[in-house]
Image (tube, coloured by chain):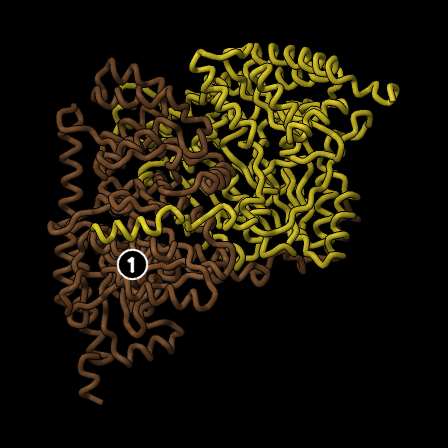
Chain colours: A brown, B yellow
Amino acid sequence: MAAFLSFSLLVGSAFAAIRRQDISSKITGAEYAVRGEIVIMSQEIEKELASGNHSYSFDKLIACNIGNPQAVGQEPLTYHRQVLSLLTNPSTIDDAEKTGRYPTDVIARAREFTPAVKFGAYTHSKGAAIFREKIADYIHTRDGSVLPRPDTENIYITDGASKGIQLILELMVTDEKDVILIPIPQYPLYSATVTRLGGTWVGYEMKEDYSASSPAWELDLSVIEKLYKEEVKKGNRVRGIVIINPGNPTGNILSRSNLEDLLKFCEQRDVSILADEVYQENIYSPQKSFVSMREVVLAKQSKVELFSFHSISKGYYGECGLRGGYMELLNVAPDVNDEIYKLSSMTLCSNTLAQAMTASILHPPQPGSPSGPLFQKEKNAILDGLKRKAILVEKELNKIHGYNVMPIEGAMYAFPMVRLPKKYIEHAEQQGSLADSQYCKDLLKALGVIMVPGNGFGQRANTFHFRMTILPKESDLVAMLKGLTTFQHDLYAKYGDPDKEKIEL
Amino acid sequence: MAAFLSFSLLVGSAFAAIRRQDISSKITGAEYAVRGEIVIMSQEIEKELASGNHSYSFDKLIACNIGNPQAVGQEPLTYHRQVLSLLTNPSTIDDAEKTGRYPTDVIARAREFTPAVKFGAYTHSKGAAIFREKIADYIHTRDGSVLPRPDTENIYITDGASKGIQLILELMVTDEKDVILIPIPQYPLYSATVTRLGGTWVGYEMKEDYSASSPAWELDLSVIEKLYKEEVKKGNRVRGIVIINPGNPTGNILSRSNLEDLLKFCEQRDVSILADEVYQENIYSPQKSFVSMREVVLAKQSKVELFSFHSISKGYYGECGLRGGYMELLNVAPDVNDEIYKLSSMTLCSNTLAQAMTASILHPPQPGSPSGPLFQKEKNAILDGLKRKAILVEKELNKIHGYNVMPIEGAMYAFPMVRLPKKYIEHAEQQGSLADSQYCKDLLKALGVIMVPGNGFGQRANTFHFRMTILPKESDLVAMLKGLTTFQHDLYAKYGDPDKEKIEL
């Protein structure tokens, strides 16, 4: 051992088989702002707050940075969690029935799911057949039963939507010649994943015109077509286009006609669609309804390849921690499906409990069933609260001088544009920050509010935004909106009002 | 719409934005035999058996293809599942305590874990702090508390071990110049992932000498050193070496001195270690004990980078479906750790329930606690059963003419070598199959036993093996081993005895 130790000391601490500079630029270049710099800063502040020894004007942080409802007070739905607690320990089902501890429809579902599925065992890599059947039923009902029912071979149950999205992007991207069109603003999983895979992502700006009569954050097909042609001219191949509907971070809902226009483009240009529809049950605008991309493709009898994604992390259920979701393939060649299956099988299967919860959540108790009334009450309370907060946030943000925000029609977010004075932009530059990042950092320190700067999602050049969730409880939101008003007023007082800059010059 | 439809028809079915030939050869070239051809064939047979209309000599399949204990009858451990059922529905904890439905140590753990963690919310991307602390305690105790306790910043809770392994390989592989050394035979996740990432994997053969006194499936450092030099000569960079200990598919346990030799090589050659230690609690040989790679690295005060992986899918707990596990980083630079954190954060976090189960399973109830006796009984029954089956399978396989198998010291597998006659190899070729694949297909059809052919794991040239688990119940194993004897006898009767081929020539 002595000989060995001396050898070890000889070569000593020079060893580091992986240095950061050795890591592929695909990885180091990938940016994921949702859990980036501001979040790390907030974790530091959290520690200071916990210590009690701090000079902040607040005692707690308000997390507006992530769509994580149960982290900010939303309670899980009773029915599904009762089912889940039986599935985790099936030996208690009989006792729960005998003692009447759980309603009979909870017992019935637990008996339906177990022993059909052994939750401690790997399932089929696409997910247990019984759950894929339930998902197929949900999709079939949602899109209208005149349309064909999904083939369960085309359904993959995934650990949240993100895992499915990564898998499909991997399939599409071989090298930097492969282009994915991504909305701007976007959810940064898309740009980060395409970068990580060594592909090229090109952002298409959605319509952002606060004076116009056109719907908020509509897809602009002329922009998409122009970018497509530019990429083709470069010798690149546009493989897929991403839509997020309802929008993250934009909170808009795409209309049927807008989706039909997109479909025409994709048919003409042989481009696949990735439809991120995880907010399909978060609809607040009475004038709008959710139309699935699948329904549009099928109604038009189109052969465009569609990959659609859903999740149990969002909606009114908000079960982020369980990591459940699914993807559905439409018009995808069987031998391509085989490759997707092979890739999925390498990590065996998604977690079985969230598989069951995905199936259960998409088939909630019906009005006449024992759990129906409580379920309806809980669901309505959550959705009504979100609706109220969507209206509140839109209204109050638009009152703040220097802010503009589109209607929050769906999803869980506002993406206000903030006009920032030149001097503040320069001040940020001096700190080595982009102005919107600096704005979020200053907001965090002044109000204890965690927001994500617009540059993390992409925004039109020379504009500044931030994304905030509408999830905190209403009293917190009211206080925060008040704080924002003062903060913005003080900022303009210190750095000048950008609306007056031209006159001042 | 009419105009649109006619447009759609015009371009018609020519559309397929992703054809298989468009998919990167990294993906199509990746092979993952554990869920490959034989498994698909078994799914077809399963359907025939279920229909009742079949001509097989068996009525059920025996799954020896995958380490999935609860799929073949192993029951989950009562204590941990009781805890889990409370965590999924924390509102029942009070009632469970009041009624005495669950033992007090179950209640205590549920109260410790919730509300500290909200299971419906995303956690820190490395996993909830409380669970990482528990994992650190486990590792610290396992390796001896004279060694430093792990820093929880170096622990990532993952959805099974596979996810962590993929992440670290992604970090190491930029292009085909990056080489990962992989044991032969190996668990095919490694070769498949390196291929998928566009890197190069080089297999190092472990010692397989049925007549020798050297331990079964030892690492042969001279082989590894030789391969290393060849790769360097080619201008390639050897980034990491994988060890699987206890071995999959080999069922061996690596000795401390063998691990020390590996460490010397890695120090000298600046190579990182990926230590797959998911079978660390599956130890059957009374002469052997598990030594973690971490203990060896720390005891030698080495600076070699180590990534070690563990899982709740294996051991005596076998909770495959929950998808829980962790990886620990040792000697990894902080800015490299930051990149790992960023990649992890893109899919937000691993599933919270398996996070909790990972922490709980690594801290089972102690002998004096209310759940202690039942837990010990269950644990012993499982481990004793596995030990008996390990001995049974080794003994019976070695009795079969044409078979050789090493002692099953740990893990869950036997990897017997089968001598196959020339005529059978030619017969397989005519079917377009490798001989060991054909052997497994014929076995499946004759006995209803699912095995994975050796070529899925890698084997010395001109040798044939298959992997079988020792998980089925003993009566099934006994019947199966008897069936194998007859099958092998009949095969030699039909195609000739390879041991006599030289004489016959």
Establish if A211 lies above or below A457. below
Name the residue rendered at 23%, 60% in the picture.
Answer: A218
Q: Is residue A246 visible?
A: yes
State which chain disc 1 sits on.
A
Name the residue rendered at 33%, 51% in the picture.
Answer: B10
The amino acid on which the numbered mark 1 sits, given as a three-letter code, is: Ile
Of residue B365 and residue A313, the one placed in the foreground of this image is A313
Q: Quadrant of the C terminus of chain A?
A: bottom left
- Crowd band around label 1 with a 10 angstrom C-alpha radius: few (<14), some (14–19), many (20+): many
Tell me which corner region of the image, top left, top right, bottom left or bottom right, holds residue B328. top right
Tell me which corner region of the image, top left, top right, bottom left or bottom right, holds residue B218. top right
Establish if B450 lies above or below B194. above
| Side (left or right) of A300 relative to B50 | left
* Horizontal and vertical percent position of residue A341: 47, 38
Q: Is residue B395 visible?
A: no
| Side (left or right) of A421 relative to B458 | left
Instruction: Residue under label 1, please give it.
Output: A450
Establish if B16 lies above or below B312. below
| Side (left or right) of A410 relative to B263 | left
Name the residue rendered at 28%, 72% in the picture.
Answer: A463
Of residue B364 and residue B217, the one placed in the foreground of this image is B217
Q: Quadrant of the N terminus of chain A?
A: top right
Extreme residue toward the bottom, this view = A505
Circle 1 SS class: strand
Of residue B62 and residue B23, the one placed in the foreground of this image is B23
Of residue A61 and residue A451, the one placed in the foreground of this image is A451
* Horizontal and vertical percent position of residue A237: 45, 60
Establish if B438 lies above or below A347. above
* Horizontal and vertical percent position of residue B75: 46, 19
